[in-house]
Image: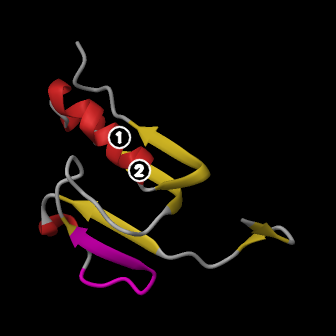
Amino acid sequence: MENGGKFRAAKRIGIDISSAVFPPEHKNIEFVQGNVISFTTDRRFDVIFSDNVIKHTALPELPSHLRNVKNIMIRGANYANAQSLSWIA
């Protein structure tokens, strides 16, 4: 949310199947090792950013992933999906 041209502090969560990608510690981000296909939480988010997740998701699992994303979004939330297409010939 904007407030006078500045964004308020936010709670951030990072999820990855491998803890090897997590930095040692970050004061503003909570890192969780888990599967984005089956990830659930009681929290709701106003922004979800997915970085190269879909290209690493098996096609049959994609609907489950997108349902999970929808289930943790608040009404009016934004979903951003970034993909590197370097693997396409």
Helix, strand or loop status at disc 1: helix
Task: Kindly tell me whether residue 32 is visible in this rendering.
Answer: yes
Residue with the mark numbered 1: 67
Q: Position of residue 62 (x, y in %)?
A: 25, 32
Tell me which corner region of the image, top left, top right, bottom left or bottom right, holds residue 66: top left
Which residue is rendered at x = 28% and y = 31% of the image?
63
Residue with the mark numbered 2: 71
Badge 1: few (under 14), some or many (20 or more) residues near its Cα, within 10 Å?
few
Q: Is residue 51 left or right of residue 21?
A: right
Along the line of sight, the residue nearer the viewer: 89 or 30: 30
With respect to residue 11, does 46 lie above or below? Answer: above
With respect to residue 14, does 64 lie above or below? Answer: above
Q: Is residue 26 left or right of residue 74?
A: left
Whether pointer 1 and pointer 2 mark residues with C-beta atoms closer than 8 Å, the reply is yes
Report the span colored magenta: 24-32
The N terminus is located in which quarter? Answer: bottom right
Helix, strand or loop status at disc 2: helix
The C terminus is located in which quarter? Answer: top left
Q: Position of residue 2 (x, y in %)?
A: 77, 66
